[in-house]
Image (cartoon, rainbow, N blue to C red):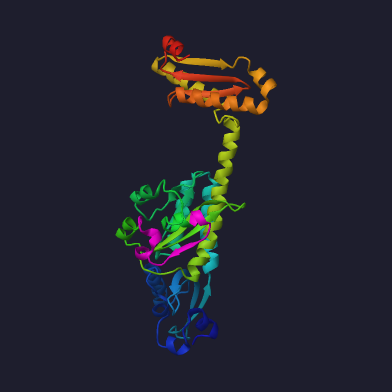
Amino acid sequence: YTNSGCAGLLGCSREEEAGRRPSDILAGPHTDRQTLEYIRSRIASKESYRAEILVYTKAGAPMWISAVVNPISDPEGNLTHILGVYTDITQSKIHEVLHRKVLDAMVNECPIQEVMNVVCREVEKILPDVTASVIGVDTQGRLRPLAAPGLPESLSAFIDGLEAGPMVGACGTAAWSGQPVVTPDIAHDPRWEPYKTPFLALGLRACWSSPIKSNDGKVLGTFALYYRECREPDAFHVRVVDLCLHLCAMALERERTKAHVHKLAYYDTLTGLPNRVMFSGKAEQILLAAAHADSPAAFMFIDIDRFKRVNDTQGHSAGDSLLRDIAQRLTLELRSVDIVARLAGDEFAIVVPDCTADQAADLA
């Protein structure tokens, strides 16, 4: 016997359910077989059990349920009935798993790539028929893969640096347009023409990419689901992705805020050079390394003569432009291992490792 609620939940009529085991009705392509065996063993031993398991409706839609089952025996101890109560916990399961694990990673100050890997891995557990990826968008509008644990690194390398645009697959187009892009058939979508080969070689046939947006509407990246068959996302996938977009946006905005705070703390806002605080730390590291290796290092302090006259006669905007030009020229003259900083006003400093006094004089 099943009530109308059970029939509505699973999409089966009582007649269709009669004479069949619940596991025969509920099990689908990605139902955990170990959990099924556990359930059957508990029933065989006449023991109650509670389990959470991914099952499927008659229409094939995946659903997480909480199953509470109690055996009923007659006075002689013979099993006569099994009372089962099934509850759809799909939404709470998604929230519980994703929120807890992603927020834990953020609280523990994990790198953004690791946070996004957590999102993808948990989504792939909830939706075993998909492969997930997260791609960031840099300030130049280029795609920067952040996480795709189910895909080879060669694919991320292939994507890295592509410029977002209207014909750049699903992710590049979603990043460019700020709108979700559904590709039911990668092989025959013109937006995928220059990029489809490595995806098809991996058996990926369809893709759904959604933009990750900040509170002010700026596109920070994309979250994508890949399918191994030509298809569109179903309602269950939409529910999962909605939550993921929120978590990804929160993580990326937090990362952007951290980067901005770090820049304010350690970089000069006018020239973009390290400020006095960062210069002191870097200089100390170079000095310690030089002492350890018994090698020379040079310090140079630069002050701009008559800089005040520029501000007084041409205005502070001209003075600011001059300081930016000087910072750029100093940077171009130095190696990547050298450090140049703006200490204050028109004062700059340079530290040069592996540099003798004569070499420092030539550099000056």
Residue found at the very far front of the displayed protein: 314
Q: Residue at x 48, y 57 (%)?
A: 174
Q: Looking at the picture, how far across and down is residue 317, in whole percent? A: 65, 29
Give the quarter of the image for residue 45: bottom left
Residue found at the very far bottom of the displayed protein: 15
Residue 312 visible in this rendered orientation of the protein: yes
Look at the picture and state if 231 lies above or below 271: below
Q: Nearer the viewer, residue 163 or 89?
A: 163
Residue found at the very far top of the displayed protein: 358
Q: Residue at x 34, y 64 (%)?
A: 187
> Magenta segment, which residues?
174-195
Inspect the magenta stretch and tell me whether residue 175 lies in it.
yes
Look at the picture and state if 131 lies above or below 334: below
Q: How many marks on residues? A: 0
In the image, is 277 to the left or to the right of 316? left
Q: Looking at the picture, how far across and down is residue 329, in whole percent? A: 50, 24
Look at the picture and state if 225 lies above or below 273: below
Residue 64 visible in this rendered orientation of the protein: no
Q: Nearer the viewer, residue 43 or 27?
A: 27
Q: Residue at x 43, y 12 (%)?
A: 362
Q: Looking at the picture, how far across and down is residue 160, in whole percent? A: 40, 47
Q: Nearer the viewer, residue 233 or 138?
A: 138
Give the quarter of the image for residue 227: bottom left
Inspect the magenta stretch and tell me whether residue 159 lies in it.
no
Q: Nearer the viewer, residue 170 or 22?
A: 170
Residue found at the very far left of the displayed protein: 201
